[in-house]
């Protein structure tokens, strides 16, 4: 089972608290996933059976995924399970012991599973996870430690990272944390805790979250589900962004055909493409001949000036520090990129290099951009 649908919403249901009959789930109003679990207990099997019956009667098809607080909450009635390990804590019981207790049952059930790093971030309140596990959350101001923990999770083979501010959090996981984690990891990124408005959900998406999880708010305000499920699916971008990123992808394919690393770029001003470029480092034997550098040179020649304050730059891969510096010097006011570059992207080395008023939108046509890069490097192995 894969849970990698971009910009999707998961409704978290606690078997001990959720009133299923009050949820306005219908064929036209439903989340993308239903997560079932809690920190303490509840009869998970009967709850999931009731839930399956309810969504079937309402003509909905929604994957039911277990989000267990301990091994006793496993049931084979669900469609899948987040196989969680609490990496933010130091308690071996929730790092590995509970996983061992449930391993045989999960294996024998043949239920789909997603190895998931569960990382608790301080949301301003003491959570039930803290009380039950006896662990402390990570400091939201210590972004380096959070990012290092997430990198370690991916190196361990986790297929998803769950950043959790906790049930009833005052402060949700910040966009700065989400963006930093997204820039350094490539697995599915799940974010939950303290998200109460579509605007907060969209801010998490824009920063790089793949899935946003909401629980407490819908328990208290089930009528709000429709507002969240009808919110824009690609916040921070537009159909024009996808159109111009498609042009950047066309440039990247030119690079691929020439056996160059397939990165492409276009620069747009007043709805007109004023510069195009793709990697030419091999052909020109020039390590600075990146796609962005080619496009910036073309754009300044088109306009007859060295500054591009009214332009938007579209590039298939997160700019490196060199290109980001050139973008900053050119005063480009908006940058849109497809897939992050955790190893050499500007956010790793120079996150403040752009012009102070510049805005960044990440993740536009991310799957297509990433697939092109993966195709190139796979052919080199």
Image (cartoon, grey):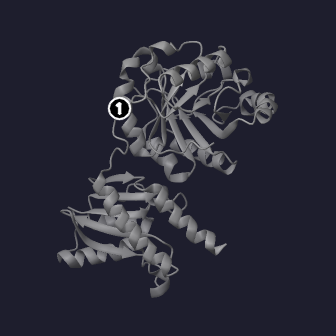
Choose top left, top right, bottom left or bottom right for residue 15: top right
Placement of the C terminus among the 4 image quadrants: bottom right
Number of numbered labels in the structure image: 1
Q: Residue at x 77, y 29 (%)?
A: 102
Asked whether residue 328 is in view, the answer is yes
Left or right, 355 with reference to 44? left
The one of 72 and 49 positioned closer to us in this rendering: 49
Q: Which residue is mark 1?
A: 198
Residue 214 placement (x, y as % from top left): 47, 27
User: Considering only vertical position in the picture, is 307 above or below 19?
Assistant: below
User: Considering only vertical position in the picture, is 136 above or below 232?
Assistant: above
Residue 240 placement (x, y as % from top left): 28, 56
Asked whether residue 126 is in view, the answer is no
Helix, strand or loop for disc 1: helix
Choose top left, top right, bottom left or bottom right for residue 293: bottom left
Left or right, 166 with reference to 67? left
Left or right, 1 with reference to 189? right
Residue 212 placement (x, y as % from top left): 47, 35
Q: Farthest bottom residue?
A: 284
User: Considering only vertical position in the picture, is 159 above or below 133?
Assistant: below
Placement of the N terminus among the 4 image quadrants: top right
């Amino acid at each position: 089972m894969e849970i990698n649908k971009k910009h999707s919403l998961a409704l978290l249901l606690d078997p001990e608290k959720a009133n299923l009959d009050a949820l306005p789930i219908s064929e036209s109003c439903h989340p993308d996933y239903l997560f079932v679990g809690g920190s303490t207990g509840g009869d998970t099997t009967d709850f999931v059976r009731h839930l399956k019956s309810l969504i079937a009667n309402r003509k909905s098809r929604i994957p039911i995924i277990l989000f267990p607080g301990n091994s006793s909450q496993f049931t084979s009635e669900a469609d899948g399970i987040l196989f969680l390990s609490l990496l933010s804590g130091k308690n071996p019981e929730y790092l590995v012991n509970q996983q061992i207790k449930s391993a045989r049952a999960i294996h024998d059930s043949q239920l789909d599973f997603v190895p998931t790093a569960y990382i608790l971030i301080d949301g301003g309140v003491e959570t039930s996870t803290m009380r039950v596990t006896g662990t402390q959350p990570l400091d939201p101001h210590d972004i380096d430690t959070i990012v290092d923990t997430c990198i370690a999770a991916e190196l361990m083979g986790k297929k998803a990272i769950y950043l959790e501010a906790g049930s009833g959090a005052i402060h949700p996981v910040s966009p700065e944390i989400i963006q930093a984690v997204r820039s350094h990891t490539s697995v599915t990124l799940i974010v939950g805790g303290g998200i109460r408005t579509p605007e907060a959900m969209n801010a998490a998406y824009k920063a790089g979250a793949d899935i946003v999880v909401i629980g407490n708010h819908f328990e208290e305000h089930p009528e709000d589900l429709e507002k969240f499920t009808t919110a824009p699916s690609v916040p921070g971008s537009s159909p024009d962004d996808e159109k111009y990123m498609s042009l950047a992808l066309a440039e990247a394919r030119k690079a691929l055909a020439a056996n160059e690393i397939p990165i492409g770029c276009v620069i747009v001003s007043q709805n007109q493409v004023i510069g195009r470029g793709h990697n030419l480092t091999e052909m020109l034997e020039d390590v600075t001949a990146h796609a962005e550098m080619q496009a910036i040179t073309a754009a300044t020649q088109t306009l007859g000036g060295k500054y591009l304050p009214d332009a938007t730059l579209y590039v298939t891969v997160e700019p490196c520090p060199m290109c980001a510096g050139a973008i900053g010097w050119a005063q480009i006011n908006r940058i849109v990129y497809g897939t992050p570059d955790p190893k050499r992207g500007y956010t790793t080395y120079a996150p403040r290099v752009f012009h102070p008023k510049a805005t960044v939108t990440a993740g536009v046509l991310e799957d297509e951009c990433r697939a092109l890069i993966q195709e190139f490097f796979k052919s080199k192995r």
